[in-house]
Every structure is written in C-alpha cells, then in structure tokens.
Image: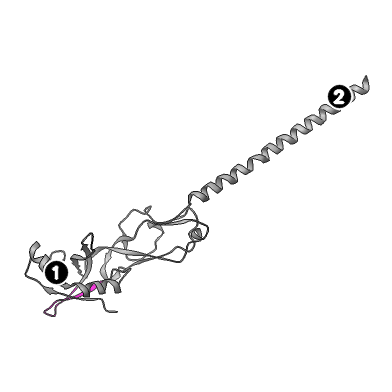
Amino acid sequence: MENTIKAYKRTWIGTSACKKFRKQGIIPAVVYGHGDEAINLAVNEKEFEKFLDEIKGRNPVVDLIIDNGEVIKAVIKSIQREAMTRRLLAIDFQKIHREEKIVMHVPVVLKGTAIGIKAGGILDHHLRTIPIRGFADQLPDHIEIDVSNLKLGQTIHISDLKYENIEFVLPPETPIVSVLIPKKVAEAATVVEEIKEPEVITEKKHETKEVDEEAEKTTTDEDKKK
C-alpha cells in the first residue's frame, strides 16, 4: 500500500477562515522541518480519515503530494480533534531529512493471549505508543509485542524490547504491559496460606498425646509399686 496524502497549499489563515473551510470538509494542516520554513496546507477530511483507517495501528512515513506536484516525505506529528464530535480540527506533519534523526511516537501492537489472562489475570496496557529516535527510513511504523508467555504478576518493560538502529526515549524500567493479579485470585492465595496452619496444630496435638501417654505410663508404674 502506498502511503500518500494529497494536499494543497493554502493562503487562508485565522480562526474564522479555518471554521469556514472545515464546514466544507477541508482541514487546515502544516508541514515543518528543522531549518525549513513551515508550509500551510489543507487536506480533504474524508480522504484523510480513510487514510487513517487504512494505517490503523501504524505511523508510517508518508508522501505528501502537493498541488504543484512537489512530494514531501513526512510523518504525522499530531492530530487535533473536537472533543465531543471527534471531528478533525488540524494536522501537523514533520518533514523528514534523510541525514537527520527524528523522534516518533509509534503505536504498540499486542500479539497473542497472555497465560496470566487464562489464569484469571487482568491485562494492563500501560503504553499505547512509545517514543523512539532514529533515521526515518530505519524506524518501524509500530512496535509488536508478543504477550503469550506473560504470567500472573509479570510485566514487559522498555528494556525487554530488542530493536536495532533505534533508541528508546523512555527509561528502560518503564512498564509497557502487565498481567495484574485480581483481588479474588489474591484472596484465594491468602486462603491457601490459612489452610496450612492446622498442620502446625496437628503436630502440637501429636506432641500432647505423647506427653499424655508418658504420664499414663508413669501413673501405671506408680500404681504397681503400691
């Protein structure tokens, strides 16, 4: 699939102008890059929403096809939406320079069903995206994590990820996904510990019985002497 987005340069700016064009299904956008002048763009709302649906779970490098035929390689840096309706408000693109490292927030895609889930655990997905740094042509468009072997109480951290040619911006100990032990499972574990206690009581009873037998023996011997 080609990751292309059609756009055209816009001359209109300001709140009132943006509202007017949004009503027509035209979304204001901007593309910027290190050392480059920002370019004001506009994209078709329906076409862009369709593109987002096609790349769901990924954040690839895209080709911005400008109205004059110019092609700009970029990544989607941010998307603004209206809180209630979730309609697009604005889009920011970051231009890519081949010799320059960039930071991208790539989606986390979980694969498999954790063993701990089957044992009654609860999956806690801490990070939905992970910021990474590297050259654009070497950055993955998503991070895939296999959670199949994750047991109750276990966590996968940033330090557990093995990728070449990229740097993870977050600290190594940052948790990504965990299998939590639910309250009922924890309570069951407590009950098991409580069940073990009578074994100690039984041993004490056994000791008492031996003492009683010795007492009875002593009493019998004394009776014989009498």
35 vs 67, nearest the viewer: 67
Residue 141 image point, x, y percent: 31, 69
How far apart are labels 2 and 1 at the CA level? Answer: 105 Å
| Residue that numbered label 2 is attached to | 219
Q: Amino acid at mark 2?
A: Thr
On the picture, is 102 further left or further right than 208? Answer: left
Asked whether the viewer can see residue 125, the reply is: yes
Tell me the quarter of the image containing the N terminus: bottom left
Q: Residue at x 53, y 58 (%)?
A: 119
- Left or right position of 42 against 198: left
Residue at disc 2, secondary structure: helix
Residue 37 visible (yes or no)? no
Which residue type does callout 1 highlight? Lys
Circle 1 residue: 23
Where is residue 49, by image quadrant? bottom left
Q: Position of residue 36 (x, y in %)?
A: 12, 66
Which residues are drawn in magenta?
Answer: 61-72
User: Does residue 83 sit above or below 22 in this rendering?
Assistant: above
From the viewer's perspective, tell me whether residue 140 is left or right of residue 150. Answer: left
